Image (tube, grey):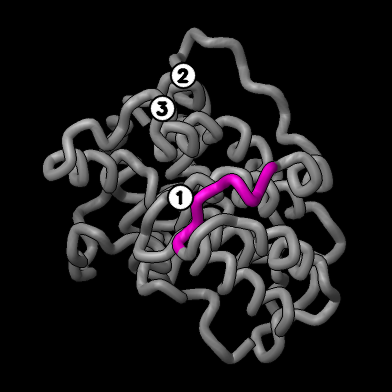
Amino acid sequence: MNHSRSSAGAPREPDLPPYQVVLAETDWGSLQTAFGNGEDLPEVLARLLEPDPKVQVAALSELGELVGRQNTIYEATAPAAMYVAGILTHPAAMTLRLYRNVPIRATLLNWLVSAAYDASDKIVGRTEQYFPGFLTHDTTVAAFRDLCPMLYRAVAPFLQDSQEDVREAAVIAALILAEHPALAEHRDHLAEHARRILDTSRHDPNRRVARKALEAWGHDVPDPDPFREEPWDWGPHSDGRGDLEPPF
């Protein structure tokens, strides 16, 4: 993400803080959400660790409404994303979705994909055409983008996960996060994963992300697929629900 305050020569950011610390030490009531302040967010986030997958998915959907409504980055989006990334290794992330036999971890990663996409170069660049100064050093979007290296380190262990849905969601999240200049050193490695998405994925939005990453990083790509290009604000799971739709 070319306009972040971070630069390729800046010191590496610290590891992601434990999710318990994020939950306890964030002043949620002082942070903006789509519906006022974030005083209700601790309870919503805590439900992500419930053993019932229906409760978990409902909580993640509610979280998206609060901090990602209409593809918007709010003040509370960044700490919420830190929490979601922090629980990727929690045992609750291995709960299987009903009817899908897919770990909740894949859904958590897809939620991070949507949040990262809303702060991506593509979305920010087009928004700035209409709202100059949308990305400055003290905006909520800039604050979220500054977290990209930290979020990447939470996602990277799942790039070769044995579960296909988890692996693909992790790759798409990593490709978007790796726009950050501090993550440029990972792009050649990620290009291999992007090519695998083009070869094997059944999801056109994910294939589109992979193709655009390869093009942006100067890699050769196969002839364009016949998938239809979507409107400018469409991205992975950008229908507003995507992986969060029933059946749970």
Q: Secondary structure at mark 3?
A: loop
The residue segment tinted magenta is 27-34
Please provide percent x and percent y for residue 79: 62, 45
Callout 2: helix, strand or loop? loop
From where the camera sits, is residue 200 visible? Answer: no
Q: Quadrant of the N terminus?
A: top left
Q: Residue furthest left?
A: 129
* Residue at x-position 46% and y-position 30%: 188
Q: Is residue 7 above or below residue 43?
A: above
Which residue corresponds to mark 1?
A: 74
Would you say 96 lies left or right of 215 here?
right
Q: Quadrant of residue 201?
A: bottom left
Q: Compared to 99, does 167 lie above or below? A: above
- Distance from disc 1 to disc 3, alpha carbons, whole Å, reads 13 Å
**What's under tag 3, amino acid-wise?**
Asp
Residue 28 colored in magenta in the image: yes
Query: Nearer the N terminus, badge 1 or badge 3?
Result: 1
The residue singled out by tag 3 in the image is 138
